[in-house]
Amino acid sequence: SALAVVSGLQYREPFVSIGDASKPMSLAEANKVIRAAKRSLCGQDLSDHLALLRASDGFEAARAKGGDHARSFCEAHSLSFRQMQTMRQTTTRLRNELQGRGLWGEDADRNGSDVALVC
C-alpha cells in the first residue's frame, strides 16, 4: 500500500549490498548490486517507490510463510531485514493512527496495487 512506501521513506533505505568478506566490494559495485535488486522488483517501471512497495509486499508474503522465509527474501533482494521490520512496524503504526482518527476505512487501500498511482 501507499503506507508502505511512506514508511519506507521515513528511514534509511532498506536496500543494501553486503559484500563478501573474502572479496571486498567497491562503492560502484555496491551501487550496481542495489540498482539490480531494485530493478528485479520494479521491472521496467524503474521507480524507487514501486521497488519499495514490491519489497514490502514480498516481505509480507515471505513472513506469512513463516520460518526464515522473510530473511531469505531479504537476502535474495539485497534488503536489510532489520529495515524491513522497521518499515513494517511504521506502516502498522501509521495505519492504526489513521484508523483511530477515522481517516482509514476498510476500503482505504482499494487502489494499493495500482502501479500508476505509486509511480
Image (tube, rainbow, N blue to C red):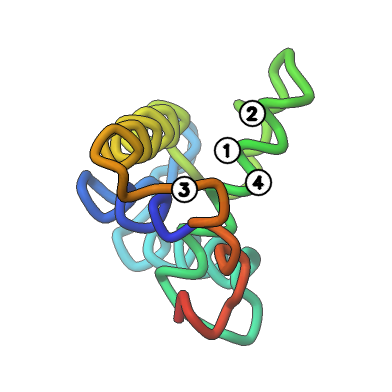
Q: Which residue is mark 4?
A: 58
* Residue at (63, 86) in percent of width and height: 44
* Amino acid at dot 1: Cys
**As drawn, 12 above or below 97:** below
Which of marks 3 and 2 precedes in the sequence?
Answer: 2
User: Residue 13 appears at what percent x and percent y?
Assistant: 30, 51
Comparing labels 4 and 1, the label whose residue is closer to the camera: 4
* Amino acid at dot 3: Gly
Comparing labels 3 and 4, the label whose residue is closer to the camera: 3
Separation (CA) of disc 2 from disc 3: 28 Å
Comparing labels 2 and 3, the label whose residue is closer to the camera: 3
Q: Which residue is mark 3?
A: 105
Q: Which residue is mark 2?
A: 70
Say left or right for 88 vs 113: left
Query: Of helix, strand and loop, which one carries label 1?
Result: helix
**As drawn, 67 above or below 34:** above
Q: Residues within 10 Å of mark 3 (few under 14, many from 20)?
A: few
Separation (CA) of disc 2 from disc 1: 6 Å
The reply to whether dot 2 and dot 1 touch (C-beta < 8 Å) is yes
* Amino acid at dot 4: Gly
Separation (CA) of disc 3 from disc 1: 30 Å
Comparing labels 3 and 1, the label whose residue is closer to the camera: 3
Q: Residues within 10 Å of mark 1 (few under 14, many from 20)?
A: many
As drawn, the residue found furthest toward the front would be 102
Which of marks 1 and 4 precedes in the sequence?
Answer: 4
Separation (CA) of disc 2 from disc 4: 8 Å
As drawn, the residue found furthest toward the right would be 65
**As drawn, 9 above or below 71:** below
